[in-house]
Amino acid sequence: MGIAAKVDQWIHHNHNTILGWRRHLHSHPELSNMEYRTTDYLAEVLRDHGLKPQRFPGTGLMVDIGPSQGSRLAFRGDIDALPITETTDVEFKSQEVGVMHACGHDVHATLCLGLACALAECAEDLDGGIRIIFQPAEEVMDGGAPQVITWGALEDVSAIYAVHVEPKLKVGQIGLRVGAITSASDIVTIKVSGPGGHSSRPHLSADVVYALGKLATDLPGLFSRRVDPRTGTVLVFGSINAGYAPNAIPETGEISGTLRTADIGVWRSIQPEFEELVHQVLAPTGCHGEVIYTRGVPPVQNDDVATALMADAVRSIDPSAIVQAPQSSGGEDFSWYLEHVPGSMARLGCWDGRGSPQDLHQADLRVDERCLDIGIRLFGAVVDQYQASACRGEFLN
């Protein structure tokens, strides 16, 4: 009996336990870098199953299963929640006011917890080591992944996998995609300044409000002519602030937004281009601009070999489950792991098929819990496929 079959058997005998884990995590959400109780809970469950989790400084943890020598296959689940007040009526809704697992991280953590506990019962059958990473702080701008990596999460890891729940896919469907499946997401702020003055004499001042308007309307259009549209690069402003009085031209103001791209090359080179365009737009207005460019995460670039292996894993469970995942403009810090080792992230369908599909980060997000067994089963099949590829000498590198 292979690893996948043993994981399936474990799932069958522990279905209610899996539900209990997810519901506990959902009802006790914690914000990024504050996941202390979550970390304690995960560590307790892992220890109860004979495993020896290693806590990260602060929050989060990882656990190794199987042989301690040689390279390891890793799986990552994020554990933080969002500052959102839940509006569902489920009996296990969030007990924390203003905090909710609205992005499915309770599901991701449960999948990794299930895989770890299932593999603990058949560790002697593993040909290579497995590492499960429970990562904190995915929801913050720069992501928790870089810090986890510095703490050694990728030492001896040869490939890494993850899934993200997708409420626009029906439960049972698994979305795969080679290349960029998410986008880079940077925050841009432009502080504009000028001498200000009376609105009756704009010719004697530099009009900060007019300059902000030019940036809001001209920059996105100009940018679309500077960057290949096939890269999915988009600039959108979400905030403009300046002035208080209708008859006074203010001395300062600012405009902020996001700059997203699905192309890793564009992401690495885009900042100077953006800053140059800002100064070109402002030059005729006489105003000065200061650009504050905050780098976010790169795109998640799914490796072709790693994704093919995951496709084989899905086909071993249900060939009809595979769908083409769309490229998202959202950011995801799983990308930082893929800067170091090959891997792939899949979209795990969690829509029950009733009503209209929801979206992530919604206060009324509901997850069809049937996706829990499916996700753990998928991870078990990935372990099987990876071990088979390793036996054929097809190590990912």
Image (cartoon, rainbow, N blue to C red):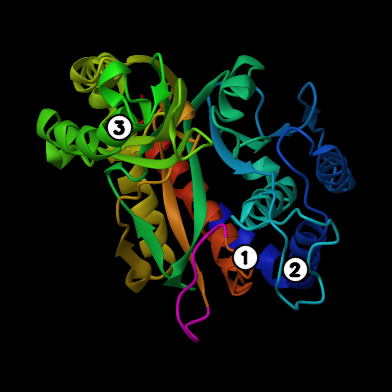
Callout 2 crowding tier (Cα within 10 Å): few <14, some 14–19, many ≥20: some
Q: CA distance from mark 3 to mark 1?
A: 53 Å
Residue where numbered disc 2 is placed: 19
Disc nearer the start of the sequence (2/3)? 2
Question: What amino acid type is highlighted by mark number 2?
Answer: Leu
Callout 1 crowding tier (Cα within 10 Å): few <14, some 14–19, many ≥20: many
As drawn, the label of residue 372 is: 1
Q: Nearer the viewer, residue 264 or 345?
A: 264
Q: Position of residue 83 (x, y in %)?
A: 70, 49
Q: Secondary structure at mark 1?
A: helix
231 in relation to 362, above or below? above
Classify residue 96 as left or right of residue 278.
right
As drawn, the label of residue 210 is: 3
Q: Residue at x 25, y 33 (%)?
A: 214
Q: Residue at x 79, y 62 (%)?
A: 94
Q: Position of residue 154 (x, y in %)?
A: 56, 22
As drawn, the label of residue 220 is: none
